[in-house]
Amino acid sequence: MAMLDSGITKLYYTISEVANLVEEEAHVLRYWESEFDTLRPRKNRAGKRVYTKDNIDTVFRIRHLLRDEKFTIDGARQMLKKKRKIKKSTSNEVQELKEMKGFLEKMLDRVKVD
């Protein structure tokens, strides 16, 4: 799955730039916005969509699920939700491990001092 190159330094991209990156038409991206809650690019003062790197990564994921993996819209939506739940639970576990590490380091410091 091709993601953005790390060499690109723009903060925001227009819908036409994103459409060119993912090789889809702009109307397809607008349709995906209506179907996927995870894809919500902001709009600038002029009302034009501005995509961030996270938005573009989401577009690539959606495109991969629909075009390469042959998921339906509903199936792709479910896969994105499942991945989001896994990512959230993993980040919670990482936070708990960091807290535990901090506690153990404090205990070791106390043992060394005593």
Image (cartoon, grey):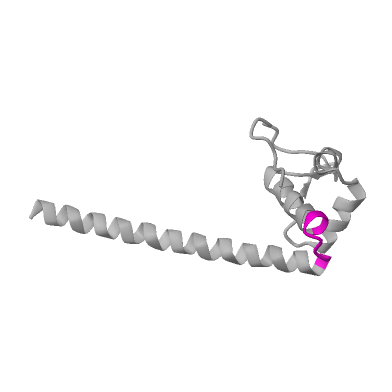
Q: Viewer-proximal residue, 20 or 1?
A: 1
The quadrant in which the C terminus is found is: bottom left
Q: Residue at x 10, y 52 (%)?
A: 113
Q: Is residue 40 visible?
A: no
Q: Taking 71 as reference, is 46 above or below it? A: above
Range drawn in magenta: 66-73
Q: Viewer-proximal residue, 39 or 82?
A: 82
In the picture, measured across the screen, residue 92 lies left or right of residue 35, that is left
In the picture, measured across the screen, residue 25 lies left or right of residue 86, that is right
Q: Residue at x 48, y 63 (%)?
A: 92
Q: Is residue 53 visible?
A: yes
Residue 39 point in image, percent of width and height: 75, 56
Question: Is 111 covered by the magenta stretch?
Answer: no
Q: Residue at x 83, y 55 (%)?
A: 67
Q: Viewer-proximal residue, 48 or 105?
A: 105
Q: How many marks?
A: 0
Q: Residue at x 76, y 64 (%)?
A: 76
Residue 59 point in image, percent of width and height: 76, 51
Q: Taking 79 as reference, is 30 above or below it? A: above
Question: Is 70 covered by the magenta stretch?
Answer: yes
In the picture, measured across the screen, residue 63 lies left or right of residue 83, that is right
Q: Viewer-proximal residue, 42 or 69?
A: 69
Q: Splitting the image into 4 quarters, where does residue 88 fall?
A: bottom right
Residue 32 point in image, percent of width and height: 84, 57
Q: Splitting the image into 4 quarters, where does residue 4 fall?
A: top right
* Residue ranking furthest to the front: 69
